Image (tube, rainbow, N blue to C red):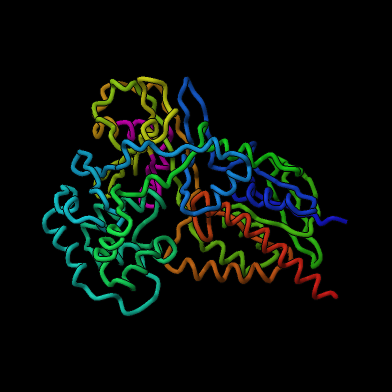
Amino acid sequence: MRQHVIIVGGGISGLAAAHHLTQQPVALTLLEASARLGGTIQTEHRDGFLIERGPDSFISEKPQALALAKQLGLESRLVQTNEQFRRSFIARGGRLRAVPEGFQLLAPSRLWPFISSDIFSVAGKARMAADLLLPRKRTNGDESLASFVRRRLGTEALERMAQPMVGGIYTADPETLSLRATLPRFLEMEREHRSLILAMLRQGRAQKIGTSGARYSLFLSFDQGMQVLVDAVSRINADVRLNSRVKTLRYDGQSWAITTDKGEQLKADGVCLAVPAYVAAALLNDTHERLAGKLRQIKYASTATINFGYRRTAIAHPLNGFGFVVPFVEKRSLLACTFSSVKFSGRAPEGHVLLRAFAGGALQPEIFALDEDEMRVRVERDLRDLLGITEDPLFVEVAKWKDSMPQYEVGHLERVSEIEKLAGEIPGLTLAGNAYRGAGIPDCIRSGEDAIEKFHAKAQRLREGTK
């Protein structure tokens, strides 16, 4: 008799796990609590606009998403970012200022663009330059982003560059964000080169990087948005049940028993929980209280994505970049904004512009708590001010994602290692999702695929143990 595996959660992690599992001779059931698959990946089409309510792209530097797209036959549908405007801006004093060419999140890889930038004061630049003389840290323990940047580059570098740049990725508080779990390459730079600026200058010469803020050529999407990936990977040979929220999960020593809120009762040899850590904790509390407790230690932040459609003539700013980030010290209502129709082709009709703003996060939970109308009004007011917008938007689409972003706080990797160790002691159980070892789409896909590999390894050890 074939083994039966149940995957709980139909986001991209659960879908990747399911796709990986269907290549094996097992019976598969996928349970999704909502009415659709894909989690936060959600593309809509409206009056010629292509609207991403969640992620709009993935990075090719981590290979899992690109590899899955190729497996699914989607390679011809991949699109790169616009080559013409690969730069970004930072808000300061009511104006958008270009991120210096070669500036990579925390430090410059080219000196003159950094020296001539008006993002930092003269005193701030001098403090950052002190990194060239400072010794490396003597201890190897985890450190927060804020502590690291203040130590190496100073407070202004943290407030004006590191916090908004990294905050735009992790929507996190830099005072608690683990550098080792999120940006370990900067720790390696300090260890190997002592100075971050020296390391970046050497890297810049080696790679001849000329873009600002991020290496935009690494970002990929699909001709009809990220939903293309969800739709393709959802075509699996499995029993997929939507609107099926798991109510109880128990292990009797031989198999797993699941009850849904519809009263469905299922038995399985293995269970993959591809859900947020707090959901997994609630389901596992009766089975393994200590594991559930560790899972509950992973905190989450809530974010909102607000899409605005405009006529191009309504916006004074040249939109000659991919978007901008907003430092917390600016006291605005938005975290960042992507010029979606500039970043990727086919996102807006001719003569129109699509903007994608972000609000909430760990530093501004009070903005997320606003009702959609008030949030829209506040964010639109900031966009008008920063971009010189003179007309009302043609439409506004608000997507609120409550408790969607895990916070990789200091000590996160040690916490995850303990979670993995405890989960490894439970037969037939694996965990997947963005809560553990990466929050991006490639990370989630890797997490789902790895969960299935762990399940097979556990089953093999069990078989060998009974021989």
Q: Position of residue 168 (x, y in %)?
A: 37, 48
* Quadrant of the frame with the C terminus: bottom right
Q: Is residue 451 left or right of residue 379?
A: right
**Which residue lies at the image location 33% right of the left edge and 35% below the top edge?**
379
Q: Is residue 461 above or below residue 405?
A: below
Q: Position of residue 266 (x, y in %)?
A: 80, 51
Q: Position of residue 388 (x, y in %)?
A: 23, 28
Q: Is residue 14 left or right of residue 104?
A: right
Decide whether residue 116 is among the magenta residues: no
Quarter occupied by residue 192: bottom left
Q: Is residue 202 left or right of residue 403?
A: left
Furthest-bottom residue in this view: 138
Image vertical order of residue 50 relative to residue 67, above or below: above
Residue ID at (60%, 52%): 275
Query: In this view of the protein, which residue sits in the foreground, 183 or 175?
Result: 183
Q: Nearer the viewer, residue 117 or 368?
A: 117
Residue drawn at x 61%, y 64% is 292
Q: Residue furthest left?
A: 122
- In which quadrant will I find the N terminus? bottom right
The magenta stretch is 358-382
Q: Nearer the viewer, residue 173 or 454?
A: 454
Q: Nearer the viewer, residue 7 or 235?
A: 235
Could you say where residue 167 lies in the image, as x and y percent from the top left? Answer: 36, 51
Tally of marks: 0
Main SS, magenta residues: helix
Magenta residue check for 380:
yes
Residue 227: quarter of image: top right
The residue lying at 30 percent from left, 42 percent from top is: 87
